[in-house]
């Protein structure tokens, strides 16, 4: 189903904004296949869960692109089928680790992989990677904290109202800055 292709067949359109077609989700960050190299390189750097890969790609592009779970998880399954990664179960998450075959594939395509990451880095810098990354990190941390706090039945109505008031004040404060 998925064969090996020369990296010349996969060109990345990183940073280029093409017109949207009616009904499309917007411009694609990568041409078919380029994301495979990115994901494999990230796993080569350290074993990762799918969610970590999504967040890392988003960070490296300065928030310009975050692959959807509907793209990442089938790609990870494909990499496993190709023998490029092995999967171990870690509680309810799958941890992906590169295999010698996967590393050899990356090594064979090192120039292409470096070019992809260089373009991702440029895109991230152009988008104000540091500032945007810090704000997004804070926003994700806030969201995780709120979701964790309101899960279950442990909070009273009064406590929930306090959390809502805090969030509304924060939104108002941000609006005043802009």
Image (cartoon, rainbow, N blue to C red):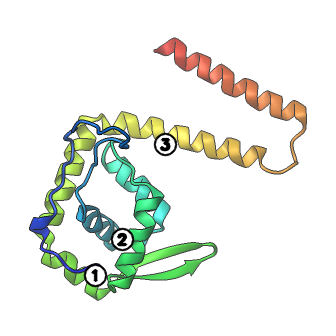
**Quadrant where the N terminus is found in the figure:** bottom left
Vertically, is 35 above or below 100?
above
Locate residue 26, reporting x and y percent.
Answer: 33, 41
Sequence-wise first label, 1 or 2 = 2
Say whether marks 3 and 2 touch (CB < 8 Å).
no
Res. 168 image quadrant: top right
Which element carries disc 2, helix, strand or loop?
helix
Give me the residue at 38% from left, 43% from top: 25
Distance CA(mark 1)–CA(mark 3): 31 Å
Locate residue 161 relative to residue 102 in the image: left or right: right
Nearer the observer: mark 1 or 3; the answer is 1
Drawn side of residue 73 relative to residue 126, left or right = right
**Quadrant of residue 162 within the rendered picture:** top right
Q: CA distance from mark 3 to mark 2?
A: 21 Å
Instruction: Determine whether, in the image, residue 9 is placed left or right of residue 171.
Output: left
Label 2 environment density (alpha carbons within 10 Å; few <14, some 14–19, many ≥20): many
The numbered mark, 3 or 2, whose residue comes first in the sequence reads 2
- Pointer 3 residue: 137
Report the number of discs. 3
- Percent coordinates x, y for residue 97 in the rendering: 40, 78
Q: Residue at x 62, y 41 (%)?
A: 143
Q: Which residue is mark 2?
A: 43
Q: Are marks 1 and 2 in contact (CB under 8 Å)?
A: yes
């Amino acid at each position: 189903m998925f064969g090996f292709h020369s990296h010349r067949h996969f060109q990345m359109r990183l940073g280029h904004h093409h017109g949207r077609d009616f009904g499309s989700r917007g411009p694609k960050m990568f041409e078919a296949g380029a994301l495979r190299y990115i994901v494999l390189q990230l796993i080569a750097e350290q074993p990762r869960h799918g969610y970590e890969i999504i967040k890392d790609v988003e960070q490296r592009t300065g928030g310009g692109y975050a692959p959807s779970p509907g793209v990442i998880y089938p790609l990870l399954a494909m990499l496993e089928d190709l023998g490029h990664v092995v999967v171990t179960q870690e509680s309810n998450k799958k941890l992906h680790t590169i295999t010698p075959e996967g590393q050899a594939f990356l090594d064979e395509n090192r120039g292409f992989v470096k070019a992809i990451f260089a373009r991702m880095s440029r895109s991230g810098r152009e988008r104000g990677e540091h500032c945007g990354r810090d704000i997004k990190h804070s926003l994700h941390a806030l969201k995780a904290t709120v979701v964790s706090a309101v899960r279950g039945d442990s909070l009273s109505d009064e406590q929930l109202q306090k959390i809502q008031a805090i969030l509304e004040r924060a939104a108002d404060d941000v609006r005043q800055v802009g």
